[in-house]
């Protein structure tokens, strides 16, 4: 590793933290302590080894290798203005391969969702507790689990349909993450994330057994919708499960197989639908309506959920 890589990493961290400092909500979570901790870790970078830091996961999620490069910034401007036909070949390839800068696209979206959740005027102690949990886990991999849940709830809060959180069920004192109303009736919402990483990270070509990937999805759904758990006891109330995937786990195809298997099993009849997100970011989603639900969604609910989440939608 070149000796100036530590300096380059620090400059990239500075750009991320500057953007965070201008947000409404995230500046309270990925705060000065978060920045100083990562800065200290970067300062210990050795020239003969790649930078690795579990605490830096969110930094890399918000980083972009071409940020500040003039031709790439111009390409992003053209793309945002809907002038893709004017993109030079290098700009077109860069956006296709690396994507847009998350500080321009994803960060404002996430901040709006989380700020909307934080502004809820009901169950304020629960809102405060969840925000404290998010802050406490900002250096840990399971930060994704917490931010995915609050992002989903914040999405519904922004839409004006979130009516409750931490909703008690009728059995065993368990709760469901949220409650929404689209067609003048309640829909219970539960959120889960497939954090287990099953695929190899080593470079090269690998043969992968897909059965564990399918089982990962079935297990996650089963954990929320069967065996007397959360959504399994919502008799007569429609329910919606949000399932976030991680890039080292089940992919879109194996997720569909797992969902189809669950939908064909009467054990999961209390589930009215599933929204699958391709990551914890809730950016690209698919909506799957349960074909044999004990309490099916209304046509209006399906129409709205399809508009918001799929069959295959990139959220903006």
Image (tube, helix red, strand yellow):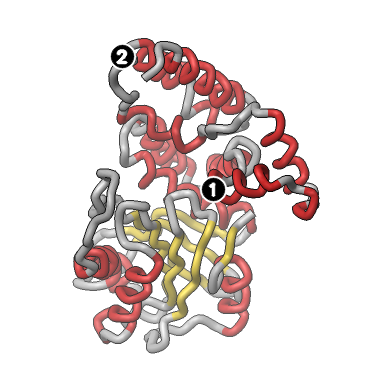
Corner quadrant of residue 234: bottom left
Q: Position of residue 167 (x, y in %)?
A: 40, 59
Decide: is 178 above or below 7: below
Estimate the spatial distance between the alpha carbons at disc 2 and disc 1, rounded to whole Å: 28 Å
- Mark 1 residue element: helix
Residue bearing the label numbered 2: 46
Residue 29 percent location from the top left of the image: 47, 29
Image coordinates for residue 293, horizontal then vertical, percent? 39, 85
Where residue 97 is drawn, which disc sits there?
A: 1
| Residue in the image at 26% along x and 59% along y | 173
Say which quarter of the image contains residue 269.
Answer: bottom left
Residue in view at x 58 percent, y 22 percent: 15
The answer to whether 171 is drawn above or below residue 146 in the figure is below
For residue 74, side relative to residue 313 (left or right): right
Front in this rendered view, residue 316 or 111: 316
* Residue drawn at the location 56% of the way across and 54% of the way down: 155
Tell me the SS state at disc 2. Answer: loop
Q: In front here: 55 or 150?
A: 55
Are discs 2 and 1 less than 8 Å apart at CB?
A: no
Of pointers 2 and 1, the one earlier in the residue sequence:
2
For the point 67% across and 43% down, the residue is 91
For the N terminus, which image quadrant? top left
Q: Residues within 10 Å of mark 1 (few under 14, many from 20)?
A: few
């Amino acid at each position: 590793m070149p000796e100036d890589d530590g300096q380059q990493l620090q400059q990239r961290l500075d750009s991320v933290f500057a953007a965070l400092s201008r947000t409404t909500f995230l500046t309270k979570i990925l705060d000065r302590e978060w920045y100083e901790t990562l800065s200290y870790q970067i300062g210990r970078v050795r020239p003969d080894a790649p930078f690795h830091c579990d605490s830096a996961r969110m930094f890399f999620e918000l980083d972009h290798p071409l940020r500040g490069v003039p031709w790439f910034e111009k390409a992003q401007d053209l793309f945002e203005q809907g002038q893709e036909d004017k993109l030079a070949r290098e700009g077109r390839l860069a956006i296709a391969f690396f994507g847009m800068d998350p500080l321009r696209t994803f960060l404002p979206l996430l901040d709006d969702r989380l700020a909307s959740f934080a502004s809820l005027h009901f169950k304020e102690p629960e809102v405060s507790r969840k925000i404290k949990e998010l802050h406490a886990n900002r250096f840990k991999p399971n930060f994704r689990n917490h931010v995915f849940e609050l992002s989903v709830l914040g999405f519904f809060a922004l839409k004006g349909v979130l009516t409750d959180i931490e909703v008690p069920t009728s059995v065993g004192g368990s709760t469901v993450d949220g409650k929404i109303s689209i067609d003048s009736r309640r829909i219970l919402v539960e959120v889960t994330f497939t954090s287990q990483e099953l695929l190899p990270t080593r470079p090269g070509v690998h043969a992968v057994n897909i059965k564990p990937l399918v089982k990962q999805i079935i297990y996650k759904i089963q954990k929320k919708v069967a065996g007397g758990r959360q959504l399994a006891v919502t008799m007569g109330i429609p329910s919606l499960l949000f399932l976030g995937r991680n890039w080292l786990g089940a992919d879109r195809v194996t997720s569909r197989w797992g969902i189809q298997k669950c939908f064909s099993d009467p054990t999961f009849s209390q589930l009215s639908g599933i929204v699958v997100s391709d990551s914890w970011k809730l950016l690209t989603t698919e909506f799957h309506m349960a074909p044999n639900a004990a309490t099916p969604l209304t046509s209006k609910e399906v129409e709205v959920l399809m508009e918001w989440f799929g069959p295959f939608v990139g959220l903006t």
